[in-house]
Image: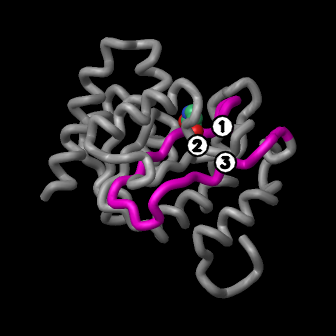
């Protein structure tokens, strides 16, 4: 965080993230991946962390999993630029491994500020890493998904990560069920 008593903005946070060395992942990145989308989005998606394509482009969910996320967003009746997309960690873990708890803790404040500043109506958590970090609930994603949970008064829906859905086509049905619950909530 830059040194000031004033509240950060998404722009100032993005600048901080670009220079961040709060954990070892910073040393291995090509680009930090802050997140992108509508700063006033009603719907926010939170993934795990950048993969290879995201690291190279500096944008979230632009690889194969991102293409599936784009389809999920479109099926919900949104354009990608209408929602906000972020990750728990902003720098790519080596070999796309799951971020370590220390790395998530070192990076997590950026995400918490993003949520605070965007104040979405609903958050969709993509996969276990996002669910475990934001909800501090260590149950498996199969247990968590499809249930409304709460983060600071914001309804949160955990569902499967699109990378998992690429490997487990059969789970798409459950994910679509979860997203339909989200669509219903957004209409209320
Ligand atoms: N997987 C994630 O969790 N986030 C991305 O940005 C890309 C792939």
Above or below: residue 74 compared with residue 4: above
Observer-nearest residue: 24 or 118? 118
Q: In what element is the residue under mark 2?
A: loop
The residue sitting at 45% across, 33% down in the picture is 127
Q: Is residue 177 left or right of residue 18?
A: left
Q: Which residue is mark 3?
A: 33
Tell whether label 1 touches label 2 (CB within 8 Å): yes
Q: Which residue is mark 1?
A: 54
The quarter of the image that holds ligand 1 is top right
The residue sitting at 49% across, 55% down in the picture is 37
Tell whether label 2 touches label 3 (CB within 8 Å): yes
Above or below: residue 167 compared with residue 60: above
- 2 or 1: tag closer to the N-terminus: 1
Q: Which mark is residue 60?
A: 2
Dot 2 beta carbon under 8 Å from ligand 1: yes
Q: In what element is the residue under mark 3?
A: loop
In this rendering, does residue 89 appear at all? yes
Observer-nearest residue: 184 or 96? 184
Bounds of the magenta segment: 28-54
Observer-nearest residue: 21 or 179? 179
Marks 2/1: CA distance? 5 Å
* Position in image of residue 95 (x %, y %): 73, 24
- 3 or 1: tag closer to the N-terminus: 3
Q: Is residue 110 left or right of residue 139?
A: right
Marks 3/2: CA distance? 6 Å
Tell whether label 1 touches label 3 (CB within 8 Å): yes
């Amino acid at each position: 965080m830059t040194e000031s008593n004033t509240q950060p903005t998404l722009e100032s946070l993005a600048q901080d993230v670009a220079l961040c060395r709060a954990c070892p992942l910073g040393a291995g990145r090509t680009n930090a991946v802050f997140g992108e989308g509508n700063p006033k989005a009603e719907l926010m998606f939170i993934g795990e962390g950048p993969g290879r394509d995201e690291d190279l482009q500096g944008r979230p969910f632009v690889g194969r999993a991102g293409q599936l996320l784009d389809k999920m967003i479109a099926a919900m009746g949104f354009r990608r630029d209408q929602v906000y997309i972020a990750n728990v960690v902003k720098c790519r873990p080596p070999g796309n491994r799951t971020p370590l708890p220390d790395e998530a803790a070192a990076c997590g404040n950026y995400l918490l500020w993003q949520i605070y500043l965007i104040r979405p109506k609903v958050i969709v958590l993509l996969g276990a890493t996002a669910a475990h970090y934001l909800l501090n609930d260590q149950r498996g994603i199969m247990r968590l998904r499809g249930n409304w949970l709460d983060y600071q008064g914001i309804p949160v829906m955990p569902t499967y990560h699109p990378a998992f859905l690429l490997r487990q086509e059969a789970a798409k049905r459950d994910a679509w069920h979860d997203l339909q619950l989200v669509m219903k909530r957004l209409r209320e």
